[in-house]
Amino acid sequence: MKTRTETITAGRAQTMAPDRQAFFLLRTVFTVAPILFGLDKFTNILTDWTHYLAPVATSVVPVTPQTFMYIVGVVEIIAGILVAVRPRFGSLLVAVWLLGIVVNLLVLGEYYDVALRDFGLLVGALALNRLAPVGSWRRNR
């Protein structure tokens, strides 16, 4: 048997406006994914991230590819946290970051499928940015 609180919470979720639902979905994804991918830059469990790095990147920033990935990981973790606490600003940081990734992959001349996927994610981050004022405005209700 559901308690009164559970019934009220379930009712609110079902009647939540579509824009608010979209905001929460996008904010959740763009919080969790950058943090997880950022953490993986330190462990390389999912993949060896250095394979996705264009050599020109390490000629501009003279560090080893793995050190470069450590820096990338820190930025991604910060971006994910910013999306959680300041979605309007954090979503723009994620969008710019994804643009950098797309450019890097195009310069690398490989992984065009990943570049296309990341472009789609960039568009999703911009959509979150457009919804963020609505989500932030309604959050205090």
Image: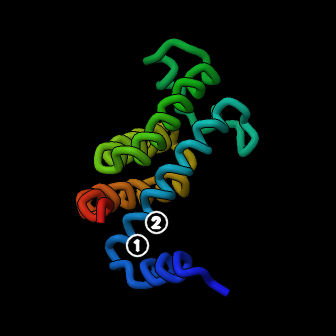
Q: Is the C terminus in the top left, top right, bottom left or bottom right quadrant?
A: bottom left
Relative to 6, say whether 93 is above or below: above
- Quarter of the view holding residue 26: bottom left
The number of numbered badges drawn on the structure is 2
31 vs 108, nearest the viewer: 31
Residue bearing mark 2: 25
| Disc 1 and disc 2 in contact, CB within 8 angstroms | yes
Say the numbered circle drawn on residue 67.
Answer: none
Disc 2 is placed on an element classified as: helix
Q: Looking at numbered disc 1 in the image, what kind of residue is underneath it? A: Gln
Q: Residue at x 43, y 18 (%)?
A: 60
Residue that mark 1 sits on: 21
Judge whether 62 appears above or below 105 on screen.
Answer: above
Q: State left or right for residue 107 relative to residue 20.
A: right
Nearest the camera: 131 or 60?
Answer: 131
Work out whether 10 lies above or below 52.
below
Split into 4 quadrants, where in the image is the N terminus? bottom right
Residue 131 placement, left or right of 100: left
Q: Position of residue 17 (x, y in %)?
A: 33, 79
What secondary structure is marked by label 1? helix
The residue sitting at the bottom extreme is: 1
Residue 62 on image: x %, y %: 51, 12
- Residue neighbourhood size for the residue with mark 1, other residues' Cα within 10 Å, grouped as few (<14), some (14–19), many (≥20): some
Tag 2: amino acid: Leu
Residue 105, how many percent across, how many down?
49, 42
